[in-house]
Amino acid sequence: MFLEVEIERILPGGYGLAHAEGKTVFVSLAAPGDRLRVRVDREQGNILFASIEAILVASPDRIEPPCPYFGRCGGCDFQQLTYEKQLAAKAEIIRDCLHRIARLEHVPEIVVTPSPRDWSYRMRAMWQIDQAERTIGYYERGSRRVCDVAHCAVLMPELEETLERVRGTDWQEFPPDLKHLDVVAGENGVWLAPAFAEFETTELELTIRGERYGYNAESFFQINPGLLEPLIEFALHDVSGETAIDLYCGVGLFTLPLARRFKQVIGVEANPKATRFARRNLQRAGLANARVINTSVVEWIRSSAARSAAVDFVLLDPPRAGAESAVINRIIDFRAPRVSYVSCDPATLARDLKKLIAGGYEIESLVAYDLFPQTHHVETVVRLHLS
């Protein structure tokens, strides 16, 4: 089934929105203002999911994607937009979620801080491997086939060089069951997991705002180091006091600066490898007033220690799925005067903000950071206070 549509705006998830024949149409890889001939790929209720068959009239915001894999590789879905329009679309995505999901009548002004680099910015990646087809790259859009990628324009040069070396390795040296590689860069090199052939593993380091962080590819760390300093500064702003809680703390990105502002800091992290790095990072910084607990945030929230805690500030940086309901409920019960929520998904952020606002919190300020140029993803930090 084919339709002719005009794209109205970009929706959460990166789809272009159009309407045709009484149906709502979600179009992949579109630009606002495009007039398109689209092919309907599937139908879900009153929504049609479609892909571009032909561009009849190109939007003034559309550019020629520089990547030869665009459209086939499932990684970047905003390369068809000018960078200015990418930022505007992300602001609109956040605004849409806050209005539609969080039910905010008056959405605060949304500023998306641009990345210092809109290309060659990624310090971490996961490369898929199909040994039968002898391909290395990323999954193709909407499938589990591996798009063979010789050059990835969003990777830092160190990772580009590593990708070239991996691709140049004899296939006989690959472990027979190897299906993907996690790779991350630091100031002192590149770490690959699992190690094989000539590739070795080492603890990586990165310095942010004077704090030195150790990590590796098996523990989460943000992908765009160019924006981490302003992100941390905004999230923590002028907070200080007796006790701070850092939920989903990873290797301690926020735990270390929090320990310099509060008499006591409790970090909670489920990943044991990230927990070990967080503890080591605190020890190396000489910060004995912070401790990191290796358990799921839900389990800790339900513990007697959490129930009895008197808390001045809560920072949470959950995965894309957002915080669990039990976690949001406990944060409300803490009655901490200030909360900062760091999110990589506007929809789950809006869902959780709705609960926090219903529980007595107000949005103090909000800033977004373009940690993921050339994609529809965006990092948002919201500061809240008790009303």
Image (cartoon, grey):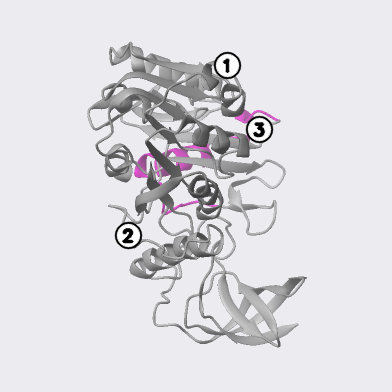
Residue 74, percent from left and from top: 58, 57
- Read off the residue under disc 1: 304
Tag shown at residue 71: none
Q: Which segment did they paint magenta? A: 149-176
- Near mark 1 (Cα within 10 A), the count class, few <14, some 14-19 or many ≥20, is few
| Front-most of residues 18 and 219 | 18
Residue 166: in magenta span: yes
Disc 3 residue type (three-letter): Leu
- Near mark 3 (Cα within 10 A), the count class, few <14, some 14-19 or many ≥20, is few
- Read off the residue under disc 2: 111
Disc 2 residue type (three-letter): Val
| Front-most of residues 298 and 303 | 303
Tag shown at residue 178: 3
- Rounded to the nearest whole Å, what is the CA distance between mark 1 and mark 3? 43 Å
Query: Which of the two labelled residues, at mark 2 and mark 1, occupies the earlier sequence position?
Result: 2
Query: Which of the two labelled residues, at mark 1 and mark 3, occupies the earlier sequence position?
Result: 3
Check contact, mark 3 vs mark 2: CB within 8 A. no
Asked whether, in this view, residue 73 is left or right of residue 275, the answer is: right
Quick check: can you spot residue 200? no
Relative vertical location of residue 91 with respect to residue 186 in this rendering, above or below: below
- Rounded to the nearest whole Å, what is the CA distance between mark 2 and mark 1? 40 Å
Q: Quadrant of the N terminus?
A: bottom right
